[in-house]
Amino acid sequence: MIEAGALVLILWFGLATLRAAEAARWWLAAFALVLFALGAAMLVRRRLALRFHPIAVVLAGVVAWGLAQVWLGISVDPQKTFEGALRWAVDSAAFSIALAACRNGRVRRGFLTAQAVFALALGVVCISWLYSARALGPFAYKNQFAAYMEVGTGIAMAWAILDQRRWIAWIAAAGAMFACAAAAGSRAGAILCLAELIVLPAVAAWRGWISRRMLARVTALGVASAGVLVMVTGWETVWRRLQEPNPYAMRAEMLRSSIAMARGRPAEGFGLGAWPSAYPGYALYDDGTFVNEAHNDWAQWMVEGGAPLLLAMLAAVAILVKPAVDSLWGLGLIAVFVHACVDYPFQQRPALAAFFWAMAGVLAAEATASARSYRPDEPSQA
């Protein structure tokens, strides 16, 4: 319980200082050091007893691959690749700590509930800040904020389905987080959050956890609450962006460049974190703007780490799919990996990426639990 609580606070600290970490890197260093310290304390407490998980091995392998790229002279930007390896080490620590700290069902439920409540509160604060100061609080980028809302929406909607006593409150929370993603102006985020409001009840009904009557009730109330709340937070920005002609034209150009880069170095890659350094040589256009990321994490992983990194990420997500369906809430995390096909939720902000991998660790811990131990209450059959 103490370890999970400490992890909750560390993750919240990282999220709250996302913008500050860009101006002063010591915020990020503090986040990483405290996370590593918690991991070391847990190892000592458990007398170095380690339980290996395939995803933990994959993440550790990515760190080793990045260091090898520097050592072997593969990277086109060794400094960026070394920093990239450190960021993956933070992700690996976050996953492993969450995996170990959240094995107990009651602890896991408390951890997830805390994350959902915090996501709702932070979402409301960020949207309020957006209208008063033209900034999304600690989030510098609307699509990364929306990806964070996707995880919170998944938890809230799962709890709405499985908690008979507070299901209306949880549906309202899920609808509010969809409204926050829409108000921020994220097209993909709004679509994915809305999809969660529909898909999660359908999966629950398919699994026999709720009746058809409850399916209709939850889905209708979820969509209705989303519609009402998006009128409050504002829908004009995302609607205007949805009306843009060829909204992903620039991303398509960058994707084509990334594919050309991957073909140039299919096995070894250009080095973790080195996509921006290698991109100018393959750019299909140049308007003088610095392009910081590929706007497609999957393509960027292929470019930076070659086929080994892309296959490793595909394997990690494949391992998470069944636990995500079994848990319901994990589908919100899968939505983030889908979002990564058109944006970069895992790039640029290490604390946010660490949060996503920590949630993957919680999902992996849930996979080892019994089929019903994760539920906050017995499924409603009303």
Image: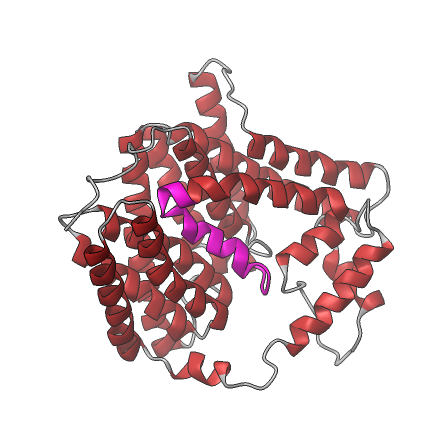
Q: Name the magenta segment's main secondary structure.
A: helix
Most foreground residue, 222 or 127: 222
Q: Residue at x 33, y 32 (%)?
A: 371
Q: Is residue 199 left or right of residue 306?
A: left
Most foreground residue, 305 or 331: 331
Q: Residue at x 30, y 58 (%)?
A: 120
Q: Is residue 263 above or below residue 229?
A: above
Residue 215 sits in quarter = bottom left
Q: Residue at x 41, y 42 (%)?
A: 10
Q: Is residue 200 left or right of residue 69?
A: left
Is residue 83 visible from the viewing direction of this image?
A: no
Position in image of residue 130 (x %, y %)? 38, 74
Q: Is residue 111 above or below residue 52?
A: below
Residue 136 sits in quarter = bottom left
Query: Where are the magenta residues, as a range?
Result: 325-345
Position in image of residue 42 (x %, y %)? 44, 23
Position in image of residue 241 (x %, y %)? 49, 81
Residue 255 sits in quarter = bottom right
Is 278 inside the magenta-drawn segment? no
Q: How many marks?
A: 0
Q: Residue at x 32, y 28 (%)?
A: 104
